[in-house]
Amino acid sequence: MLIPDGRKLLFSSCVFVLLAALGTGLARVVAKSTSEAPAGFNTPSFNGAQSISNGIVEPAGDTFARDQQVYEQNKAVADGLGPVYNAPSCVSCHQNPNSGGASQFTELRVGHNDENGNFVNPTIFINDGKNTITGRSIVNDRAIGPEDQEHIPSTENIRALRAALNTLGDGFVEAIDDTTLIAIAERQPELSDGRVHGEVVQAPIFEAPGQTRVGRFGWKDQHGSLLSFIGDAYLNEMGITNRLRPKDATTVHKTTKDPEDQPDELGLADIDHFAQFVRGTMVPPRDEVLAGTPAAKKGAEVFRRLGCNVCHVESITTAPPGTLIDGGTFTVPEALGDKIIHPFGDYLLHDIGTGDGIVQVGPQDTANKLRTAPLWGLRTKPRFMHDLASLSLENAISRHDGEAREPARRFKELSPEEKKALITFLRTL
């Protein structure tokens, strides 16, 4: 349809306003019942204050406080901890500024490429070479005995550190419909002159064997459901077998019977409490006072002008309540459905020049791709990027390359005042 010249500007302005109202304009048409997701750092773990959930309905007999207590509980060897592990509890790695948040901890991933350049998981020798651990890229830092301790052989020359991820608000992330993330990926080339195109990978749903879903959890989008993500972490980070991951990496020094995670008197295993806790958390809040300052408002304009929001998507809307997800095993509840979230992330894989060379559930072309780091909760971190190697936001921005080369170049050309405004804006997140 041709638009008279006098109405072009008005038409364009209306389109811009509409897209802004919808976040990316890709999530879907916002229903009248749509509302902002509740935000807050409301899961204190150190000062004895009462935690507050997002309003999610608990299973019969359960409470949000109990879910958090299980999430924070240290496990012992008698509970199944190990034989190899990274930490004795979930909160050990997810605790800043409170339970469920990110922390300045890293996990180790290694491997090598075969003669065709394809990534291969490592073979790790333990127990003086008598036993091996295979089939996974993670290498645990701890063990319940010296015979179990993993050491990296020289053959595994791909080596990477990854930061522990924030889990606050991840119930809302789980509730994003697959089509929303796919639509964001399809729109990105148009928004970036073809430079950016997030990759969508299909991740297996452990609780629904044979089913997959668009991955969104983990640095490689290796999981599409929270329960899958949690079951995998319980084994690979804590060494505790469960119904979704029933086999330990090694049996050296193992004395407990699998699966070690057994249902309690409510019929809920630890992984169920973990999932219920994460699904019940609020999203990381903004610093609204700082966000209201002229400098932060100007910084938000710079953020968009540079094109940062192509990947660091500002607003996404979750699926309606009643939507079946996770291979039909979970129904989006009222507390999570039709909610607008502001993750400043797209949950897609991108090559921005900082890839770690590791392949997990995706194809080989994902080796040097990583999930866009959602920026919500950024102000709680002193170190940045997937490896925590950046000690300033300026350095983190300068490391962007590949698909993000153009925004990084534009950042370098900003005036000192504009750079300061952008950093101020980022510190509101």
Image (cartoon, helix red, strand yellow):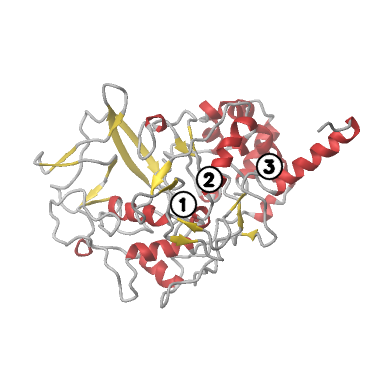
Quickly name the residue at label 1. 166
**Residue wearing tag 2:** 374
- What amino acid does circle 2 point to? Pro
Asked whether disc 1 touches disc 2, contact meaning CB atoms under 8 Å apart, the reply is yes
Badge 3 or badge 2: first in the primary sequence? 3
C-alpha gap between disc 1 and disc 2: 9 Å
Mark 1 Cα shell of 10 Å, populated few (<14), some (14-19), many (≥20): many
Q: Earlier in the sequence, mark 3 or mark 1?
A: 1
Instruction: State the residue lying farthest toward the right.
Output: 6
| For residue 144, above or below residue 75 | above
Q: Nearer the viewer, residue 5 or 112?
A: 5
> Height in image: 176 above or below 127?
below
Amino acid type, mark 3? Ala
> What secondary structure is marked by label 3?
helix
Q: Residue at x 13, y 54 (%)?
A: 253
Q: Which mark is nearer the camera, 3 or 2?
A: 2
Label 2 crowding class (10 Å Cα cut-off): few <14, some 14-19, many 20+? many
- In whole angstroms, how far apart are the C-alphas of marks 3 and 1? 23 Å
Q: According to the image, label 3 marks what residue?
A: 300
